[in-house]
Image (tube, rainbow, N blue to C red):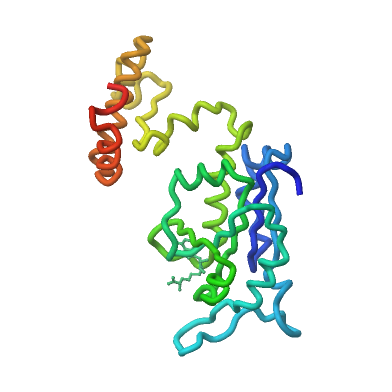
Amino acid sequence: MSSSWSATILTLFPEMFPGPLGISLLGKALEKNLWSLEVRDIRDHGLGKHRSVDDTPAGGGPGMVMRADVAAAAIDAVEHAGRPLIYLSPRGPRLDQDRVRKLADGPGAILLCGRFEGLDQRVIDARGIEEVSLGDFVLAGGEIAAMALVEAAVRLLPGVLGDHASTQEESFSSGLLEYPHFTRPQLFEDRPIPEVLSGGNHSEIAKFRAREAQDLTRTRRPDLWTLYVKAYPKGPKGL
Ligand code: SAH
């Protein structure tokens, strides 16, 4: 395994990858070996002639459950190399930029994508698997959540985005939503670009952007605003 950031995906649908992860800046970074992607088919560890991976839920109820022995065999076949083992699951803590940054700072991740009703609890316990959710909604499988996690982490790796500074200022980096962006034309349907942005006064521009970011966060995300005010009790940063 190379020393670059590496993701291993355990899935029943390996053909979904690299998919969007092979496109644009991430795809170019993949070609340049700035990160690596390994996709493993869980079904390779399936049982019997039909390579079965699931069975009916103990105790009854709808749907099927991914078997613990099959999932464990898939997990144990991977070289872990110090990487966290994560099961994408709506029951985990919601993924946020802090967690993404920590993952990007580490050696990579092993991502287990569930299907059906989910995974037998015993393999989660036996392998000490961390659960991570993409949000408070239910997907049909963990693949799109795994892609979102990988995309968010990989774009933070050195050399992946053209302008590294752009990841420092954006939404959530400072605990605030990002200020609004404008570009040409100067006038769009009677709406001009805010005057201060064309004036060339960098400290005025910085103040304007800080104020906009704070106003947006206060009105749209009072939960983030409360945390931000706690972190900067002497008044907002940048004003
Ligand atoms: N019965 C489960 C949902 C199963 S959905 C429940 O109610 O909790 C099937 C698979 O999709 C899950 O095993 C998980 O891997 C994935 N998945 C669904 N929603 C997700 C979410 N919000 N975040 C991450 N993975 C999710």
Placement of the C terminus among the 4 image quadrants: top left
Label total for image: 0
Identify which residue, 186 or 102, lies in the foreground.
102
> Is residue 148 shown left or right of residue 206?
right
Q: Examine the rendered structure and indicate whether residue 191 appears above or below residue 95.
A: above
Q: Where is residue 97, by image quadrant? A: top left
Q: Residue at (30%, 26%) from the top-left corner?
A: 237
Identify which residue, 158 or 170, lies in the foreground.
158
> Is residue 130 shown left or right of residue 214?
right
> Is residue 19 shown left or right of residue 215?
right
Q: Residue at (45%, 52%) from the top-left corner?
A: 95
Q: Residue at (30%, 20%) from the top-left corner?
A: 207
Q: Examine the rendered structure and indicate whether residue 169 appears above or below residue 44.
A: above
**Residue 116's x, y, as percent?**
53, 75
Q: Examine the rendered structure and indicate whether residue 161 appears above or below residue 110.
A: above
Q: Where is residue 157, by image quadrant? A: top right
**Residue 123's x, y, as percent?**
57, 73
**Residue 27's x, y, as percent?**
66, 42
View extreme (top): residue: 200
Q: Residue at (69%, 67%) from the top-left corner?
A: 76
**Residue 182's x, y, as percent?**
39, 25
Identify which residue, 81 or 58, lies in the foreground.
81
